[in-house]
Image: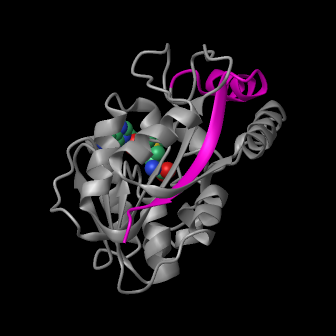
Amino acid sequence: MRKAGKPLDQLTLPDLAPVDHYHARGFQATVELADRLTIGPDDHILDIGCGLGGPARYFAIRFGCKVSGIDITPPFVDAARKLTALLHLESQVEIAQGDGQHLPYAGGVFDGALTQHVTMNVADRPGFFREAYRILKPGAFFALTEHGMGPNANPHYPAPWSLDGGGSFLATPSESRVFLDAVGFRDIVVENTGEKYLAAYKQGMALAASGAMPALGIHMLAGERGAEKMRNAARNIEEGRTQPVQVICRKPA
Ligand SMILES: C[S@@+](CC[C@H](N)C(=O)[O-])C[C@H]1O[C@@H](n2cnc3c(N)ncnc32)[C@H](O)[C@@H]1O
C-alpha cells in the first residue's frame, strides 16, 4: 500500500480491489458474479474460503447486507480481519477461521453463499456442497467459481491452485452439476468462463513481459513460480485441460 502511495488510514474499497479479490479476473469477476445475484440489505451471506475478504467487503458495501467470511488458512484470516478493520467494516463483515467441509454454523441461517476459486483444493466436494446446502435458508442461492477439469484433463503444473498437482481436486463441470444436484440444489446454471479467463491471463502475461506490473495486484499473492502458474493457467484452458466455470444454483424454497 505504501509503494502504491495509499495511506493506510485513508484506504477505500477501490484501493484494495486490485489485490483482495484472489481469483482469476479479480475484482471484475466478483462484480459480474454479484450482478447475477439478488441480495437485500437484511440478508446475511456467507463467503466460504473468503481469502483476504475482498469479495465479502464488496458484497457488504454493494448490497448493504451482512457478510460472514470463513477461511481455512490462518494468515488469510488475520489479513482479512485487518483489512476489514482498516475499512471500518467490522459491523457488517465478520471473518472466521474454519473448514468449508465442516462449517461451524447452525443450519438454515444464511440467505446465500458464495465460494470463489476454493473448490479446486477441496478433497471432499460432496461434503463441501452438503455443508453449503445445510447452512442455507430455503430459497437461498449458492454461487461457485472455479477451474473445473477440462475434457483433456492432465493440467500442467505449477498452476495457481497447486505447485505439482498435490492437493488438487478438480472436477469436470458435469461432475460438479451432479454433486450439486445430489445434495439437493436446483436451478443449476453453469456458465463457461474459459474465454474470459484466458483473455485476462494473456493480458497479465503481456503486462509482466513489458515490465509494467503495477505495485498492487494478485501477482503479490502468487508465491513461488507465480509467472509459470499464470502461463500454465492459460495453457490449460487453451488445451482443454481445464474448464473454468461460474455456477449459480438454489436451495429449493
Ligand atoms: C484462491 S483463494 C480465493 C479467496 C477468495 N475466495 C477470493 O476469491 O478472493 C482460495 C482460498 O480458499 C481457502 N480454502 C481452501 N480450502 C478451504 C476449505 N476447505 N475451507 C475454507 N477455505 C478454504 C484458502 O485458504 C484460500 O484463502
Q: Quadrant of ligand 1?
A: top left
Lateral position of residue 144 relative to residue 31, left or right: left
Q: Position of residue 33 (x, y in %)?
A: 59, 62
Measuring from the top left, give residue 141's x and y in whole percent.
Answer: 44, 65
- Image height check: is 18 above or below 62? above
Residue ID at (40%, 49%): 51
217 is higher (above) or lower (below) than 9: above
Q: Which residues are the magenta region? A: 224-253
- Tell me which residue sits at (52%, 79%) in the image: 62
List x then y, in percent, for residue 34. Answer: 57, 68
Whether residue 93 is visible: yes
What residue appears at the point 32 percent right and 70 percent down from the top-left corner? 138
Q: Quadrant of residue 45?
A: bottom left
From the viewer's perspective, tell me whether residue 9 is left or right of residue 174.
Answer: left
Q: Which residue appears at 38% of the width and 62% of the height?
A: 251
Viewer-side residue, 125 vs 77: 125
The quadrant of the picture occupied by the C terminus is bottom left
